[in-house]
Amino acid sequence: MCATYESLSKKQRQAEFTKVKSHFDSLKELGLKLNMARGKPGKEQLDLVSDILTVMVSPADCVSDGVDVRNYGELTGIPAAKRLFADILGCKPEECIIGGNASLTLMYDTISKAYTHGLLHSETPWSKLDKVKFLCPAPGYDRHFKITESFGAEMIVVPMTEAGPDMDLVEELVKDEAVKGMWCVPKYSNPDGIIYSDETIKRIANLKPAAKDFTLMWDNAYCVHEFDGDFVPFADIISLCREAGNPDMVWEFASTSKITFPGAGVSVMASSVENVAYMEKLLTVQTISYDKVNQLRHVKYLKDKAHTLALMKRHAEILRPKFQCVLRWLDQEIAPLGIATWQRPKGGYFVSVNTAPGLAKRTLALCKEAGVVMTGAGATFPYGKDPKDSNIRIAPSLPPVAELEQAMDVFCTCLKLAALEQA
């Protein structure tokens, strides 16, 4: 059927409903158990990098720059790991703190320490303030929103545009001294897959917030994660903020979670030297050191930015057919019906679908009924509340292509059924 659902007569709509409902019932009978709830690398990707487990086999392999990584010390990370991440991010080694397996932990720690101790330019810990507000470009990453929500911050939605956050609104909102920061995923944003424009990044770096300790949480999670096309360079936000007179405004985060092993990777947080020194004093009370053996393992395996990008090309060969599968189903089954639009990302881990208003929850409930679990409706907005009930995040990376074909058949059928029910 090529006509849009809106253009169908009542009789045609009923006939289409009967047809789609019959197909839905047949899909339920398959007893599928498919999970597309998170952007997890698939087994083929994990197998691709499993030789990282054998790069350190003798005591001699455990020494780097004179540091025995099996022992205590080097709280902010071994020098070689700082050089590796500085090479990838475009910043300086002395601007890096190397953490454990998850950048999310470092993000949580940053917000937590803002509440318990205050940041470098805080006049008082955030917990002692009457109100703390945080800007949340949306649709966005649900775990970012959960962090700030867990500390009681008031989250303010900033709409995303094709160029990144709505900067006219951001520049107005930061005039409020209670606005203490903003979440950003600047490259292949989660879930839209948008790359912030140079103009947007410049405006962000040049913000003039009323709060002296306004903190830009710059989650560069997908900085080297192209799956379609060549590597897209990105600006060094730390240098840009410094040049704009905001040297301590930004904390940049990244990790190897989707480069090597998500459960056993290495993370980094980067900022001004002054910010790093301040954070080191707070971390000294928290831990003696992160896992330096794993840091060195990654240095030996990834080597440098060029070698890392070559590895990401191999990841791309695995991921590309999966994203092509998702887009093919959407183009063929949904596009002609006028019930949804979607982004066409060239990197990152998600496809963001915007249904007609009021269809997301019902579509995902039907998917679950047919054996396909996806990210919950509303998850991409603060407090889990999508004002239009329309955004759905598809994560194609985990299932093999054969399973993904089945899952997209289910998804497209459920979206059709939800739209016809509403009509």
Image (cartoon, grey):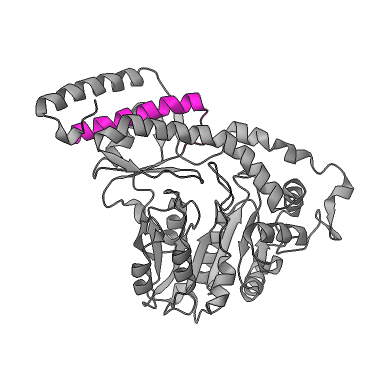
Q: Nearer the viewer, residue 218 or 343?
A: 343
Q: Quadrant of residue 145?
A: bottom left
Residue 138 in percent (x, y) is at: 37, 56
As drawn, 386 above or below 83: above
Q: Which residue lies at the image location 46% right of the left edge and 56% below the top edge?
A: 144
Residue span colored magenta: 396-423
Q: Residue furthest right?
A: 60
Whether residue 260 is visible = no
Q: Which residue lies at the image location 52% right of the left edge and 77% below the top edge?
A: 244
Instruction: Kindly report the secondary structure that dominates the magenta region of the rendered protein.
Output: helix
Q: Residue 101 colored magenta?
A: no
As drawn, 402 above or below 91: above
Residue 39 in percent (x, y) is at: 50, 41
Q: Nearer the viewer, residue 339 or 212?
A: 339
Residue 197 in percent (x, y) is at: 46, 60
Check the picture and name the quadrant holding the N terminus: top left
Q: Residue 404 colored magenta?
A: yes
Q: Residue furthest left?
A: 10
Residue 61 in percent (x, y) is at: 85, 48
Q: Nearer the viewer, residue 354 or 117?
A: 354
